[in-house]
Amino acid sequence: MSRNLGGDERDAIALAMARIVGGEHVLTDEAARRDYAHDRLPYANFCAREGRLAGVLPRLVVRPGTRAELAEIVKFAFENKVQIIPFGNGSGVLGGAIPISREMTIDLRRLDRILSFDAEDAMVTVEAGMNGAAFEQALNEKGYTCGHYPQSMEISTVGGWVACRGGGQASSRYGKIEDIVIGLSAVMPDGSPLMVRPVPRRAAGPSVADILIGGEGGFGIIDTVTLRIYRKPEVERGVTLAFPTLAAALDCAREIMQAEIRPQIARIYDEAESSERMEGLSGFDDHPILAIYAFCGQAPLAGAEEELALAIARRHGAIIADNEPYRHWKKNRFFVYSQVWQAKGYYNDTIEIAARWSVLPSLYEAIRAKVKEIYPSTYFGAHWSHIYPEGACQYMTMRLPPMPSGEAMRIHARLWDCAETLALDYGGTISHHHGVGIFRNAWLERELGGGLKLLQSLKAAIDPDNLMNPGKVGMKAPDGAVSVPHG
């Protein structure tokens, strides 16, 4: 069979899939397939507002209920040269789940069980399609957490966290997803199994798991993940601070991390984002920069970390503010605001980059100035919410007012190029935790250098027919594929 399947061949594939998973788990009608034609890529949402797709409809959708069924599906696709896309819950924001060549989409959400829980070894094994919030709730009921809290918690899957190399809101304490994963299993492009056994650490050659962590389904489909787990904190101590300048707030964050203090939450807002969160509060005229921190764990340790961090903050001119901004953030931490702006006709997008402390202030100013030069009425705000001893993630929101779509799309493309190019110019990275998908392909060669060719060679070796999520993460797009901007 070929990529350009006719109706009869599509029916043959659907029949083969029905034999594997049952007819009720094979979706072929247009309305059902349309639900799988996009993720939360803002550009795709802009297109949807006009009644069009950013890519194409998947040829069909199949929903395996077991890992054996998944392996059988992938083996069929390999033997019959059918391109496939794994689908978690469609929460990605860079188009990684968008079909560009009439691929078959594999919905993994029926793989949603916790397979084992091991308190002695402090780890849990879970199927890739389990909802993130349901997974965390199940751990909480046993007195544990996995420490990974993305904003998409309620609309994402555990496998999606891993496939996109995500980072959660508590990453400064628990690490990113690659720090929490200690084992996984996957189905390789030919349908064969791959097992990375959970051990504390290994030095048995390069990390095989890292081919899949961040591979976005292009090198194999993750079906189970083994994660570290941590006891639920005895206490969580949140505090809101206000700083006289952004430089002071960033210097404070750097010193906290370099002092080996590990806050659970650390979020520093620029003046634009601070003013929104300070609305209705008084006494901030001389301290316009807002920051929220939280310290957790056993009460004596959390208290000691908070005391040490506050001492550093005071040296940088901070004052302890009303804690309402922290309480509001915690209550709404998993709310996805982009859909609100989308419904009002705005063009809202977020871009997360990362850089070293020594260049962050100048990088921020350079991007902000360029954004205003491109389109002065653009809303631009930023915060720093994943901090490290050597640097931080800069998470930016850019929003255009309602305007003709063609004009907005041109400006939107320039804003993206501005942020990604300047991140590279200043020695930073184009992506901190959202991944690549299709939308960041244009900058990946400069990001990875010779590393991109290495990944492409690996892809060609294990997926010679380019069947697994083609055209994503810098990999070759199929002939005749739809071109998504920046892709």
Image: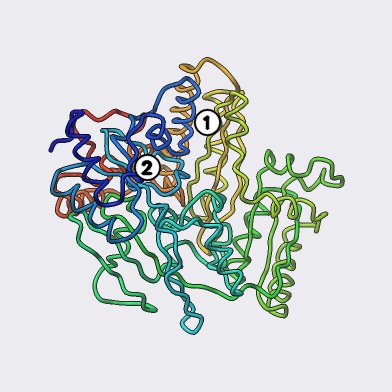
Residue at (56% x, 57% y) in the render? 133
In the image, residue 239 sits, relative to residue 423, either above or below, namely below
2 vs 1, front mark: 2
In the image, residue 442 sits, relative to residue 87, either above or below, namely above
Number of numbered labels in the structure image: 2
Taking the image as shown, residue 466 lies to the left or right of residue 147, namely: left
Q: Is mark 2 on a helix, strand or loop?
A: loop
- Whole-angstrom CA distance, mark 2 to mark 1, is 28 Å
Q: Is mark 1 on a helix, strand or loop?
A: helix
In front here: 171 or 259?
171
Image quadrant in which you'd find residue 330 = bottom right
Identify the disc placed on residue 370.
1
Residue at (76% x, 62% y) in the render? 314
Q: Of all residues shown, which one is farthest toward the bottom? A: 120
Label 1 crowding class (10 Å Cα cut-off): few <14, some 14-19, many 20+?
some
Residue at image mark 2: 96
Say which amino acid is labelled 1: Lys
In the image, residue 330 sits, relative to residue 143, either above or below, namely above
Label 2 crowding class (10 Å Cα cut-off): few <14, some 14-19, many 20+?
many
Say which amino acid is labelled 2: Gly
Residue 311 screen position, x and y as percent = 74, 68
Residue 205 screen position, x and y as percent = 24, 72
Residue at (33% x, 39% y) in the render? 441
